[in-house]
Amino acid sequence: MSNRLIRTGLGELLGIDYPVIQGGMAWVSTAELAAAVSEAGGIGIIGSGTAPAAWVEEQVRLTRRLTGKPFGVNVMLRSPFVEEVIELVRKERVALVTTGAGNPGRYVPDLQAAGVKVIPVVSSVALARRLARTGVDALIAEGLESGGHIGELTTMALVPQIVDAVELPVIAAGGIFDGRGLAAALALGAAGVQMGTRFMCAAECTIHPRVKEAIIKARDRDTVVTGTSTGHPVRALYNKLSKTYMEMEEKGAPAEEIENLGIGSLKAAMIDGDVEHGTVMAGQVSAMVRQIQPAGEIIREIVAEAGQIIEKLNRLVVR
Ligand code: TUI
């Protein structure tokens, strides 16, 4: 397969060859996956989730042993350890911090002063505009096709709106699986893509094999969104736990009771492999995942396919 570069400016910003970011996923994206993605020319992200700084520090050290290339850490802003994790990534001067589930505005100046690039994940135009004013380096616009905590707009509708609203590189996330997704994202004005679900089935991803199997088995309508009634919608594979969620939401159970169902459930799925009583957060593209592949192969495939599509589209235009 040919492997030319797709130059969008994201490569220069992050010091990488291909405009592909691996989504930071709690309990999923550890040093092994992050390092493999970075080694292959994308950028890998350690998902810190609700882990304390000591765990993140260990992961940063391990990643540095596995690759000399730039990598990032995702900070989940609803973590009880958010302050100490921010301090750790600042002290360690990791190349990139992505954030999720909140507004990271107040951390931006200190991180950038330490040489850390800051790229928040947003799911609305309002937050994109607010964060653009804080001087963030780029934005990840994440549509509701994604797994995990999601917003209310699709990638197709959200990405061009954010591209028009800010003068920053925008990375598209949610529903992106292959070179078609990358080419489509570029057509919407994005400078690159972030992918989570596909990298869950990378050979280097350390999650329980039963989770990979469940994703490979999933069909088009097998993800569901629960938690909308509590204000924290989450997309995950349909299973016994999501059935319970839906029943409780249906009968109008108190928000606290519904939220309590989720405690420990992500770890139960990803680490213990309980794909029936745990939360298997995964996106709508789960249905497209058919095999376990090395991260490097995934990246090379996507970039080559996007290149071919762009050339083919070019030939569609008759002069
Ligand atoms: O963050 C994600 N996906 C996630 S985080 C996660 S772990 C979790 N644990 C407990 C509660 C919630 C999540 C699993 N999946 N994606 C990035 C993302 N961020 N999508 C949407 C947002 C978002 C939502 C609201 C970003 C900012 C925001 O702002 C609210 C505010 O404070 O203005």
Image: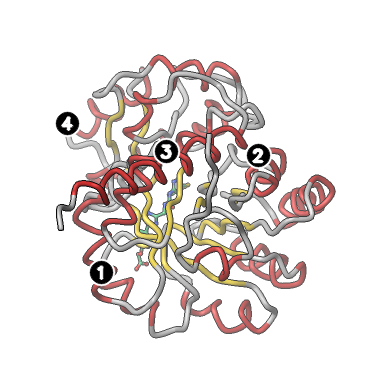
Tell me the tag on residue 250: 4
Amino acid type at circle 4 is Glu
Q: From mark 1 to mark 2, how far is it between C-alphas?
A: 31 Å
Mark 1 surroundings: few (<14), some (14-19) or many (≥20) residues within 10 A: some
Please give left or right for residue 91 compared with residue 268 in the image.
right
Asked which secondary structure carries label 1, the reply is helix
Query: Which comes before the other along the chain, label 3 or label 2?
Result: 2
Q: Nearer the viewer, mark 4 or mark 2?
A: 2
Amino acid type at circle 3 is Glu
Identify which residue, 246 or 24, lies in the foreground. 24
Quadrant of residue 309 within the rendered picture: top left
Q: Which residue is mark 1?
A: 125
Q: From mark 4 to mark 2, how far is it between C-alphas?
A: 38 Å
Q: Residue at x 26, y 42 (%)?
A: 254
Q: Quick check: which quadrant has ligand 1?
A: bottom left
Quadrant of the drawing holding the C terminus? bottom left
Please give left or right for residue 147 compared with residue 206 in the image.
left
Query: Which comes before the other along the chain, label 3 or label 4?
Result: 4
Image spot of residue 183 (x, y percent): 34, 48
Contact, CB < 8 Å: mark 3 with mark 4? no
Amino acid type at circle 1 is Val
From this view, report whether residue 269 is shown above or below residue 169.
above
Mark 4 surroundings: few (<14), some (14-19) or many (≥20) residues within 10 A: few
Query: Which comes before the other along the chain, label 4 or label 2?
Result: 2
From this view, report whether residue 64 is shown above or below residue 206.
below
Image spot of residue 29 (x, y percent): 60, 41
Q: Residue at x 46, y 58 (%)?
A: 100
Quadrant of residue 262 within the rendered picture: top left
Please give left or right for residue 301 compared with residue 294 in the image.
left
Q: Residue at x 38, y 47 (%)?
A: 182
Tell me the tag on residue 305: 3
Identify which residue, 54 or 193, lies in the foreground. 193
